[in-house]
Amino acid sequence: MSNKEVKSSAARERDNMITAQTLSEALPYLQRYDGSTIVIKFGGHAMGNSEAMKKFARDVVLMKQCNVHPVIVHGGGPMINEMLDRLKIPSEFIDGKRVSNAEVVEVVEMVLAGRINKGIVQAINAEGGQAVGLSGKDANLMICEKDLKTVIRDGVETTIDLGFVGTPVEVNPDLLLGFVGSDFIPVVAPVGMGRNGETFNVNGDTAAGAIAAAMEADRLLLLTDVDGVKNKAGEVISQITAQEVRDMTASGVISGGMIPKTQTALDAIEHGVRKVVILNGKKDHAVLLELFTEHGAGTLISAS
């Protein structure tokens, strides 16, 4: 046997030992989450990258195989922008929320509940899972009311109508709860329905938080493009309480695009979700690292 073959054999044995050790170390966490419901907000970088999508899909299938029940809620802002540009329909945003007239919301529903939703379903199925695509309209999953934005302009408080942008006021989780314990993985597009049959565009984080609360999920994972909540020195905080989030927001340490994510976390915890994690979905196997390793990933937010 040549030296090259000996080294190759030794390298394989070393890799196998690392794999076995990793599986062994994951056992307590596999036991911890056995039978748990985990709501995952999927968005950002991974949605537009085929390799990242494949890895995410495989991780989700592995979770299900381990008797952990993922519920995927996705976004799709960049894809909506692309389609609106292609159709020459102008976009307007107010404080990060898309103003959605009847023409815009029709495109939003087409992209979210069509192209994006079925793309995620296809990716999960390709990895051996059994995903089912849904929207907030199915079985009255997400009943919404119009989201009216109040702003101060020239010293005067003004209410702005964002059009068909909705806030969930009633979530009926029976359909999703029916998937828990089954072989199916639900994938939900954040499109809701009004009491008069209107279609509403719902922020993906907001939808995920509302669904997680209604299902009393063990965890809500908010996948984003940053590593987590950072302190004043710019360092990622591994764990933080709800009150610390409020204090850091009031002092300006938590600011910008992190505010709506932490607010989603606070709302979810207040309504029954045990813990929320904000983590970087660009990192390979971020979900598995969070659930099945000692140090997790991102920032874990809890009630106390």
Image (cartoon, helix red, strand yellow):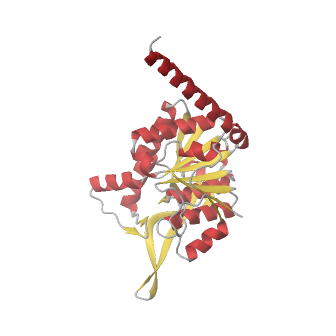
Q: Position of residue 81 (x, y in %)?
A: 35, 56
Q: Position of residue 239 (x, y in %)?
A: 63, 59
At 58% from the left and 72% from the top, the residue drawn is 248
Q: Quadrant of the C terminus?
A: bottom right
Q: Quadrant of residue 15?
A: top right
Is 148 drawn above or below residue 84 in the view shown? Answer: below
In depth, the one of 134 and 98 nearer the eye is 98
At 50% from the left and 70% from the top, the residue drawn is 255
At 47% from the left and 53% from the top, the residue drawn is 75
In depth, the one of 258 and 24 nearer the eye is 24
In depth, the one of 272 and 170 nearer the eye is 272
At 63% from the left and 47% from the top, the residue drawn is 38
Is 30 drawn above or below residue 38 in the view shown? Answer: above
Q: Is residue 214 left or right of residue 126?
A: right
Answer yes or no: is residue 183 visible: no
| Residue furthest to the front | 3
Answer yes or no: is residue 117 visible: yes
Is 247 drawn above or below residue 279 in the view shown? Answer: below
| Residue furthest to the top | 1
Q: Position of residue 134 (x, y in %)?
A: 53, 45
